[in-house]
Image (tube, rainbow, N blue to C red):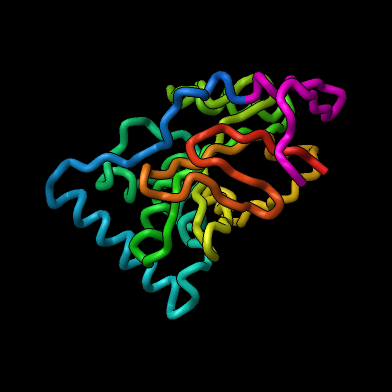
Amino acid sequence: MFLDAVNTISKMNNDIVETDDLYEKWQHWAASKISHHGGTCCEIAREWLFAMDFSQLNGGSIFSGPRWIRQRYNWGPTHWAIYWCEAVQQNALDCGAQAALANEVFSVRGVKSYPVQLVQQFTKEATNQWSLRWDGEDTAVQWIKDDLIYHEGCAIVADNNEIKIWDASAAWWINPKQFGGYGSLLAVRLFAAPDDPDSFQWGDNFIAANEWQKIKSL
């Protein structure tokens, strides 16, 4: 599977998605980041997170996905901005907050981790339900566009410049081979610093750093 060409068209459930418009709405969005009060309240919260991950890891591989985050926090609306001392006390966190927690956990383990933005396709029925839920809790629904959603995860470097992408709110590794259909991944963007590599390999996909990449379904 290779990256799709510009201006091609994807079909799913008889709906046509022009791929050059996939991520236009989220082109200038930054990855979610949990804020810090600069005091002991947030430091204690961060130490709790890392201690919890250490206990859950229980001597396992540092490259294993932190599934306990999804077990601890339901997926749901989050009011932004959110601070560390607030985040760890929530019952539910959205994908951005859960991805930010996972990214910090991997980094503290000593694993190179990068924030990742995703565009997925579902159905209008599903996105309408999610929109009503977020509206009902007075939170922003700009992450929804028709049957498309903006999503977040994190990418870890497994070997050289080969990456794996962790979906924290689903508690699984995303398959680099996409087959279309409900929940399929259409685009990805990985945020890297200037001194990091400028490209990565994800399965058969070439991922350029800091640029939206379209993903072709098999």
Q: Residue at x 55, y 53 (%)?
A: 166
Q: Is residue 55 left or right of residue 86?
A: right
Q: Does residue 190 belong to the magenta stretch?
A: no
Q: Position of residue 69 (x, y in %)?
A: 46, 56
Count every numbered label the image shows and give the total. 0
Residue 134 in sight from this viewpoint: yes
Residue 15 sits in which quadrant? Answer: top right
The vertical placement of 198 against 21, above or below, is: below
Residue visible at 42% across and 63% down in the picture: 111
Residue at position x 25%, y 47% from top?
Answer: 85
Residue segment shown in magenta: 1-22
Residue 95 in sight: no
Of residues 214 and 99, the one drawn nearer to the viewer in this rendering: 214
| Picture quarter with the C terminus | top right
> In the shown orientation, is residue 12 left or right of residue 87?
right
Q: Nearer the viewer, residue 205 or 54?
A: 205
Q: Which image quarter: residue 4?
A: top right
- Residue drawn at x 80%, y 28% is 10
In the image, farthest residue toward the right: 14
Q: Position of residue 140 (x, y in %)?
A: 46, 23
Q: Considering depth in this image, is 50 or 17 the residue closer to the camera? A: 17
| Residue sitting at the far bottom | 59
Question: Is residue 12 rendered magenta in the image?
Answer: yes
- Where residue 73 appears, x then y in whole percent? 46, 51
